[in-house]
Image (cartoon, rainbow, N blue to C red):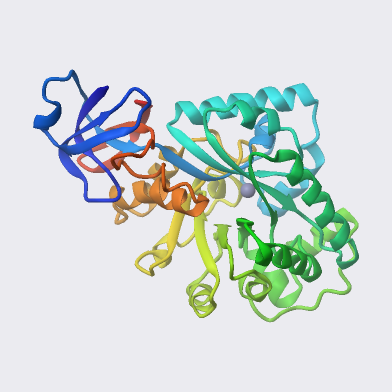
Amino acid sequence: MKSFKADYVFPVYADPIKNGIVTVDDNGKILSVSEYPNPEYQHHPIEQLSGIITPGFVNTHCHVELSHLKDKIKAGGGLVEFVKDILAIRNADQDKVAAAAEAADQQMYDNGIVAVGDISNVDATIPIKAKSKLYYHTFVEILGFLPESAEEVFNKALKLAEEFKPQSVSVTAHAPYTVSKELFKLIKHHSDAGNNLLSIHNQECEDENKFYRYKLGGFIDLYKHLGINIDYFRPQARNSLQSIIPLLTNREKILMVHNTCTNLKDIYFIKRFDRKINWCFCPNANLYIEKRLPKIELFINQGLNITLGTDSLASNSKLCILSEMVTIQNKFPSISLEMLVQWGTKNGAEFLGIDGDKGTIEVGKTPGLNLITGLDGLKLTAEAKVKKLI
Ligand SMILES: [Zn+2]
């Protein structure tokens, strides 16, 4: 048994507690969370800390298998160039891929992350996830913009997902610009029938909307580069997100990732559909690839579930949820730390369906505990740091 006292404890399911104290058992299970002093545990040793205690972080968007691409792709080149580069250099020596992935898993652990929603295109991370201290849900990602290839790529993904079992796994669409209507329909049918959590890269750049609206922009060049004939594709006269929503299941939760070029019209459009949409922001990756951030203020106070992700080390200098929070707070000072912590813990746990045990400091749960220091009152500073307590 162990107790931690800090300037603040953020239980997240309830208001922050000034001079809070958390007591855990030897397995990290929460025994109590209250104001200091807690008479029930006053005779046990207490570790006095300055800073705030939060639950362990949940990273809802990562690609652990791309960790070997750190510093390999030039920053600021835009998404189309990024995708071309990734496809050109993603295949590397298997030992290198495995070593970098293992180091990434350790880095997330050290940065107080307890659970990850991870995109996989290959089987490279299966052994790492099997022995990791983190919880993983793997999204086996499907790409195929040619309607005639839909069945083949879908079946290949189902086979890869089988290899990940008994780990938590589902199959998902990569992005509106890499998945044909036919392929979306196969994924929908599969998701309608059973448990199949979805995670889709959404509106990461303006060219994605331009392609769907007018069949113009940088993606035309990408398909040419990849040798994909898109003669069949008709401009949809609306943004990519609005175009694909009818092709998605209403039985399963869906995470829209990035949302860099999502506007208020898109958000209102979504609200009219009975789809279980969640929103994930990965601000550091957006700055790395597109040098811009989503219009995050538009998503606030709309009753939407917002989560945070790191994306991969191909487009980020580290895998650290606190660092994503610092970036958001810098750009959007009106967003409170309390809200950011909720995005990076409880909301992610709810999306992944692990909120029975993770995401909040609540008696009976084993959420992990982080200490955040480097604050100015309740604002994060550039010196903010996270230390894993348990
Ligand atoms: Zn991604």
Q: Residue at x 63, y 73 (%)?
A: 245
Tell me: residue 41, above or below residue 228: above
Q: Nearer the viewer, residue 70 or 353?
A: 353
Q: Residue at x 50, y 49 (%)?
A: 283
Q: Is residue 19 visible?
A: yes
Q: Nearer the viewer, residue 101 or 234?
A: 101
Rendering quarter of residue 203:
bottom right
**Percent of width and height locating residue 104:** 58, 29
Rendering quarter of residue 167:
top right
Q: Residue at x 57, y 29 (%)?
A: 105
Q: Nearer the viewer, residue 231 or 114?
A: 114
Q: Residue at x 40, y 45 (%)?
A: 345
Q: Assign the C terminus to one quadrant of the image.
A: top left
Tell me: residue 345, above or below residue 2: below
**Percent of width and height locating residue 4:** 23, 27
Q: Nearer the viewer, residue 292 or 194?
A: 194
**Percent of width and height locating residue 243:** 66, 75
Q: Assign the N terminus to one quadrant of the image.
A: top left
Rendering quarter of residue 383:
top left
How many labels were placed on the picture?
0
Q: Is residue 125 visible?
A: no
Most extreme residue toward the top, as rendered? 45
**Percent of width and height locating residue 268:** 48, 77
